[in-house]
Amino acid sequence: MLCMAFLLFGTISDKISPRLEQKFYAAIKTSYTIEEFALEAVLPDSETNSITPSSLGEDNLFKVFHKDSLIGFAYLGQAPSMKNVFDYVVLFNSDFSIKKSKVLIYREDYGRQIGSQRWLKQFVGLAPQHEIIYGETIDAISGATISAKSMTKAISEILFSVEILQERKFL
């Protein structure tokens, strides 16, 4: 049934470091409170991929299965910080509302506040139809302006990409 599925200890992509993969799997396990799961990559055609603002490929968007039942979706991405990039995950419920977002690897000395669950919980429950605007619908963070704007923009783009995938029947 899951021709492109990867079990918990499998490799999802050669492009993803073992450390990032481990953090990604841990986020899935804790967010969905499961020990075992399978992932199936969501691979839209090139035309659809060209119109989505988020990068979609074999190592970005996944269906998450537990015991052959779809329990949600996971998006693994990167966003720019002041001088580098950070890795994050957005986990969705099966209705495409955000279950949890988490910064997995942050590579700067400043701006780490975006990893705070207190700040990230603002995204929980948002769905493709919600408008996300940094400083308006999402609180700003003093000392992490670039990273917080970047995370807000990334999640907004993911939600818009999900909406496109739904309209084109990929989800």
Image: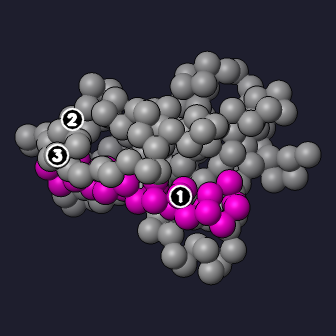
Residue found at x 8% / y 40%:
142
What is the residue that sits farthest to the right in this orientation? 1
* Residue 33 image position (x, y, % from top left): 61, 19
First-in-chain label (3 vs 2):
2
Relative to 43, 146 lies left or right: left
Above or below, comparing residue 67 to residue 110 in the picture: above
The foreground one among 153 and 94 is 94
First-in-chain label (1 vs 2):
2
Relative to 136, 170 lies left or right: right
Q: Main secondary structure of the magenta part?
A: helix
Q: Residue 163 carries which label?
A: 1
Is residue 10 visible in this depiction of the protein? no
Instruction: Say which residue label 2 marks.
Output: 113
Q: Separation of disc 1 and disc 2 at Cα?
A: 29 Å
Relative to 38, 143 lies left or right: left
Q: Separation of disc 3 and disc 1 at Cα?
A: 22 Å
Residue found at x 40% / y 32%:
124
Give the magenta part as a residue range. 145-171
Above or below, comparing residue 39 to residue 93 in the picture: below
Is residue 159 visible in this depiction of the protein? yes
Q: Quarter of the image holding residue 168?
A: bottom right
Instruction: Say which residue label 3 marks.
Output: 136
Which three-letter amino acid code belongs to the residue tagged 1?
Answer: Glu
What is the residue that sits farthest to the left in this orientation? 142
Query: Helix or strand or loop: what does disc 1 sit on?
Result: helix
* Residue 19 image position (x, y, % from top left): 52, 41
Whether residue 153 is in magenta: the answer is yes
Q: Separation of disc 3 and disc 2 at Cα?
A: 18 Å
